[in-house]
Image (cartoon, grey):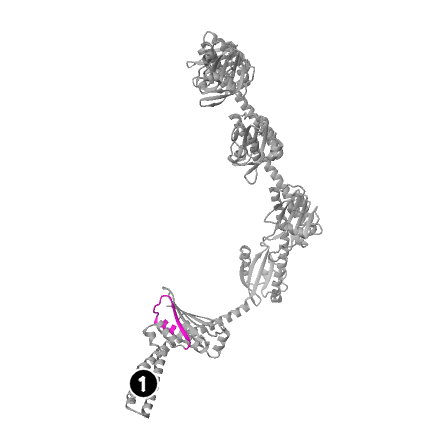
Amino acid sequence: MLAAYACRATHAHGTRVWVVTDGQPLPVAEEGRGLALSDGTLVSEAMTGGTLLHEGMLAALPFGCGALEFVGADPAALRALLHAGPLLTLAVEGVQAREARRGHGRIAETVEGLMRRLGGSLDLAEVLTVTAQSAALALGFRRAFVALFSELRDGGARTGEVFTYGFTQPFTGGIGVGPVTFETLVQRGEAIRFERGRDHESPLARGLQELNPETAVIAPLSARGQALGLLYVDTTDPVPATDDDARIVLALAEQAALAIDNARLYGIETRKREAAEALREAGAALAGSLHLSDTLQQVLERAVALFHADAAAVYETQPDGRSINIRSAVGLPSEYMLRVRAKVGVGVTGRAVAQGTRVAARDLTAEDHGGSSRYARQLLANGTYPYRGVVSLPLRVGPTVFGALTLYWTAPLPLDGDDLALAGVFASQAGLAIENARLYEEEQLREREAGALLAVSRVLSERADGSAGPVTNAGPVTDEALQGAVREATLALHAGRGLLALFSEEQAAPGAARPVTRCATYNLHPPHPQELADLAAQLGRGPRPLTRRHTLPVAGSGLIVPLIGAPPEPLGFLYFDDPGPDAPGARTLQFARSLADQVAQTLTRERLLAALKREEARYRQLAEGAHDLIVSTDARGVIEYANPAARTLLEPLTGPLTGADLLTLPTHDTRPALQAAWTDARTRASGSRAEIRIGPYHLEVRLGSVDDGRGMLTVSRDLSELQTLADEIARRGQALEAATSRQSELRSFLTLFTQAQEEERRRISRELHDDTAQVLTATTRRVARLARDLSGEQKARADDILLDLNAAIDGVRRFARNLRPSVLDDLGLLPALEWLATQALTATRLEVSGAERRLSPATELTVFRLAQEALNNVDKHAHAHTAAIRVAFGELPQGGVRVAITDDGRGFTTEQAHAQAQAGHLGLLGLRERVTLAGGTLDVQSAPGEGTTLTFTLPG
């Protein structure tokens, strides 16, 4: 049979079938003529190489366990038959297996009859139907069916579509196989015989209750170690089933399984070819259009046709990244399309977008997938969801998922693994096609937007006479230009009405809004000032959609976008509205921002150029009044402008400067210096300088390149006057240095004088204490002894002398202490200051802060004298009630001491202090000089009626 089939299929003169037996290829069948030309060599070579070989009129086609040898076969038919190699292998292996079990009886006849009826058919439905019919007729039973497994699991299985013979009612929903039956059929590969009288209490009897057979035989269908399904034969007549019946059904099942597997594999290959062709056609169709709407329609129609779906939809991810909406659909109810707002990560479609992988639900109404939207969940909860099978495929470009293609079936999902893989490939093609179309439309949209921006810029750049040119040629932007700009912008945004409003250039008061001074409209009457103010109140940092509540009358929706200048400041705003209620989308808002930026840029340029004109006029005025020589030239050095100072100084020597060559004006000996500086200035951003002579004038010239090297600006200064000034400065500097040296010498002398003065005070104080005071004390004692010896008037006179002597002693001692108090040398600064406070006429207190310590003798003496002089000034001039001496010791290692003398007297002003100094009262000057000599500082704080504080800060 195989030889005859191959001979007919290839239009060959003859065909021979070779099969490997015991390691050697042997001919087992042949058909036709011309086979004597072959000796088997070509067959051996073909089987060894595993490829189709040709030698003259001979050809050898290997397959699995053998080969086909042809004489005069059609080459194209041979190549087509080459793809059926696996099927040929299965057929021959089946024949071999059958022959191995074949006997001389009923089994062989039955199996041969089945093969004869199948006739090599590769139509799966036909194979299944013929198998069921042959099994029933072979046993003389009334009914039979063949069912293929659709679901296999541990300990059980479930079939899909059932092909029957003799049953009056169709099978729906498949057939379940329990664990006991599954173990016998699938795991052990044995047939099952059922007889009601014997097995009526078995689990199988309960499973067959609906079929109600008297006798039944069930055999497994398996090929290549894979369980395919089962073959069932029964009768309602009380006829027993023998072991031969079981063996016949088992043999039929084995042979049918091979045919079923061949048909299944052929169907898979056929479907793959058809799918590949369909994908190719779909890819070509999708690539043929760059319009997004057409591409979406093509994707949906091709998906529905290719996968036999009842509906399909393309979902698009929204800018917020959290929701997805239906962009286009086929077969979905209108209400479903309007109300479904899916969320990313929820439901079948939402999870496909979030995970970036295929998500399928075989029966959405029975599985817990949930709904992508609230509306879908309501339908599922009510049991009215219109679809059962759903698969969602992510649409991506590279790693980015931008949406999903979702297919819907009213029945459970009919796609197997291969179909789902094919759907994934189709979704990839669809994603690329949609992205290409979207990019094309975006490019088209950008071109249209760019054209609109250019139109707005052109309109704003038109002069009052209607010709194009820079705005600054004719002053500010005209009202006609503003109206043309708002017209172009309104049409570009597909809006119904438009408004352009400009704020006043004057700064408003703090907290007040800047009023609108200019306004241009399109299809709109100029609004009232209050309406303009209300619109201005809606301004934000960028474009904003407006609801009907905030738009001008009649409008249903609108948008407003500010005009921001540079530096950032509000120039005005653009307003557009439309009668419809739909709010403008994100792309419209973005384009409105671009239009606003274009208008703001033009207005800002106009204002900046006007300001530049004013600055140019101001700089020209400055140049005209400058004393320096300012000259502007072109790139060749030809003078284009010279200020009055340059013309006044140089034109008597050179003639008119305008039009003269600057590089030829200097004397011959200084001309190279100007030329070198000119070259440096053209290459250095910081410019250059040179010293030149023009006639009797010695000039310093600074050069700088302007206008990107197309000109040169020079600023010159007459160094003749500067040299005179420099000489005068040098002379005065020498005088100041001499005065500073003299002052230093005076300070040194004053320091030595002060030291000598203190030494002299100490010496006089010691002599008064050790000499004069002692003499007076001795004299007092002698007068006292004399007074004790006298009486009467003489005694009274002696007592008077004694009193005078005691007063003289006190005065000498007080004078000695004032000259150099011994307490300072003996006990230190603080006891000396405390004694000084007690001696002051004004009530004075001593306050000490910081860690008390002894200072250097010179520092202690300086502090004492400063406090002494300050308290004397308080007693003489302050008219104070109280005073205070505050001593603050600084922390080591820097150390130092700060002494503040404070009183609550009448105080003084700076002018009064200068007046006292002019009058010869040098108290403050003396204090400041003594502090400076000690390396310290003096701070004076005083005001009339608020007292005085002198703060001395000394190192040590």
- The secondary structure type at the circle numbered 1 is helix
Magenta segment:
841-864
Q: Which residue occupies the foreground of this view, 413 or 289?
A: 413
**x, y (%) of residue 78?**
53, 17
> Which residue appears at 54% of the width and 55% of the height?
683
> Which residue appears at 55% of the width and 69% of the height?
721
Amino acid at the residue labelled 1: Leu
Q: Determine which residue is flagged by label 1.
A: 776
- Does the stretch in magenta take in 857? yes
Q: Quadrant of residue 383?
A: top right
Identify whether 676 is placed above or below 912.
Answer: above
Compared across the picture, whether 414 is left or right of 738 comes to right
Q: Quadrant of residue 292?
A: top right
**x, y (%) of residue 895?**
37, 66
**Is residue 866 visible to us here?**
no
Q: Which residue occupies the foreground of this view, 304 or 773?
A: 773
- Does the stretch in magenta take in 732? no
Q: Which residue occupies the foreground of this view, 706 or 372?
A: 372
Looking at this view, name the residue that lies furthest to the bottom. 793
Compared across the picture, whether 626 is left or right of 951 comes to right
**Is residue 534 visible to us here?**
yes
